[in-house]
Image: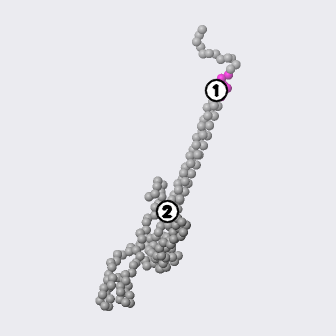
Amino acid sequence: MSSAAPKHAPGAPRTPFALLVLALIGGSMCALLALNTASAANEVRRHDLAVKDAAVADAAVQLNNDVNASAAPQNLAAAAAALGMVPADKPAFLVLGADGKVHLMGSPGAATAPAVRLVSPKSSTTPSKTTPTSSTSASGSSTPSGAKTSPTGKTTPTSTPTPTPTPTPNTTLPGGPR
């Protein structure tokens, strides 16, 4: 008995088995190529959507900043002045009580033209500092500037409204307000 390679049956050809193995390997390579191509196409689509998403987010932030800027007190005051509106001297408020009755808080007064000219925030002029001076009337008495002298000779101080500081609008950015 010799140890030789096993002999195949005389009618069993090796070619169909080799072709089957080659077809399976070739088919799996084609499937792998198709999956890789589909994955790359999905990645390109994902990248395009991420770019569009970033552009939309930037536009939303810009619109939000525009809304905040237009709602800033100085811009509202300038828009109201452009429409001919003036600030009220003595505002009054209606308060609804717990019993359902309406109460008037304060005493209403007529609105007058503003004493201070509103300056646009885009203006490059800077206000100059002024110091109060006194003027001398014909009788030799000293009258502080900003005071009125009545026909009876009494001096009454006039009040000029002090401008209220305008807060900086909060801007909400990704990660929270700043």
Q: Secondary structure at mark 2?
A: helix
Q: Amino acid at mark 2?
A: Asn
Q: Nearer the viewer, residue 64 or 28?
A: 64
Image quarter hosting the C terminus = bottom left
The residue lying at 59 percent from left, 13 percent from top is: 4
Res 65 label? 2
* Count of numbered badges drawn on the protein: 2
Q: Quadrant of residue 167?
A: bottom left
As drawn, is 146 to the left or to the right of 7? left
Quadrant of the rendered structure where residue 33 is? top right
Is residue 24 found inside the magenta-colored segment of the image? no
Give how far across and how far down residue 27 sits, in percent: 63, 34
Majority SS type along the magenta span: helix
Q: Residue at x 60, y 37 (%)?
A: 32
Q: Is residue 37 above or below residue 154?
A: above
Q: Which residue is mark 1?
A: 18
Q: Amino acid at mark 1?
A: Ala
3D distance between C-alphas at marks 1 and 2: 70 Å
121, 44: nearer the viewer: 121
- The residue most toward the right is 11
